[in-house]
Amino acid sequence: MTDSPAPRTASAHRASGLVLAIAAAAAFGTSGPFVKPLLDAGWSPVAAVAVRAGAGGLVLLVPALLALRGRYGLLLRSWKLLLAYGFVAVIGAQVFYFAAIGRLPVGVALLIEYSAPILLVLLAWARTRIPPALLTVIGAVLSIAGLALVINPSGAGGLDVLGVLFALAAAVCLAGYYLISALPSNGLPPVTLVSVGLLIGAAGLGLVGATGLLPFTMSFDDVVLPVFGQVSWLVPMGVVVLVATAFAYLAGILGAVRLGSRVASFVGLVEVLFAVLLSWLLLGEVPTLLQAVGGALIVAGVVFVKLEREASGATDATDAPGLELPEPIAPDPGAVTLDHRA
């Protein structure tokens, strides 16, 4: 007796999804160490994110149009998905996060935002009335505990209520990013969704800046990268656009296709670990022993959630109940679509 090719294909599909999700987390983790010098040189966060999203969308625009193969009507039929991705996944999480850190310590705001995986577990529980499996509970507790140690928030006195609400809104948007990344798209290629979504996000952030709701300033002076010395602002921005935006968003959405929203969200927690490691290597910010322990707990939590999914054979319908998402299948290499999904 030989094993059926279908289980082997599904297993390989999930394995590739895990690799893509980790690669996306690592790529997203590069944004902080390379954006920080830009902020120090006078860039406002909203301006940096707008340029990052706009340029990242343009980088992917040619392959996005080629993937459509002349089926431009898909853009009109998918306008709700595109707007949701642009405003929730690209704008919402970042704008609310920046508003939160204006009122809360950065570590506290980030910790609240990265409670998004717990929100997804609670959503599944509320929609199905089925309590999460024991391994999922263990994984959630380990991941959040590890995240707390990695971020190491301290010095927080009384918390600003509006700041907490902003951070919770950022968490909801982050959870929305994983859910949107797991929705069927009626044939819209993943690269097209990412490219157009980024361009919509950039346009939205430009409008936010134009209204004066948040500062929108740029500086084209040279910046200082501790490892490389004084360099053009194009160097860190280029890394952010190509690695932390174009590649990260595309790899993240392809990974979520294969893993489902819940598992992808927990793997996304590894981004914090990568950000700490890159800050250590590039900025000389040495992680503490507690942060190292926290990183190990994050990885352990991801493993527990992954083991529970493998043991139960859970589908995306349990990851995002009510969304009716079927089990991911390997996409046709000749015509990559979001069914199912990005």
Image (tube, helix red, strand yellow):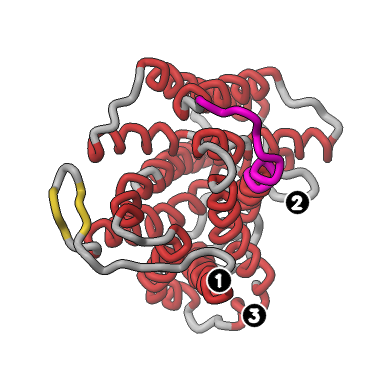
Q: Do the residues labelled 1 and 3 touch (CB within 8 Å)?
A: no
Label 1 element class: loop
Please indicate whether residue 236 sits to the left or right of residue 156 in the image.
Answer: left
Residue hosting label 2 = 323
Picture layout, residue 221 above or below residue 20: below
**How far separated are the C-alphas under marks 1 and 2?**
37 Å
Please indicate whether residue 158 sits to the left or right of residue 277 in the image.
Answer: right
Q: Residue 71 carries which label?
A: none
Please indicate whether residue 109 sits to the left or right of residue 35 in the image.
Answer: right
Amino acid carrying mark 3 in the image: Leu
**Nearer the N terminus, badge 1 or badge 3?**
3
Tell me the residue at 41%/17% (across/down): 290
In the rendered image, residue 95 lying in the magenta stretch gets the answer no
The image shows residue 2 at horizontal and vertical percentages of 49, 29
The image shows residue 217 at horizontal and vertical percentages of 40, 68
Amino acid carrying mark 2 in the image: Leu
Residue hosting label 3 = 76
Amino acid carrying mark 1 in the image: Gly
Picture layout, residue 37 above or below residue 81: above
Residue range (magenta)? 155-167
Residue 8 makes an appearance in the image: no
Residue 51 makes an appearance in the image: yes
Specify the farthest residue to the left.
Answer: 229
- Looking at the figure, which quarter contains the C terminus? bottom right
Residue hosting label 1 = 212
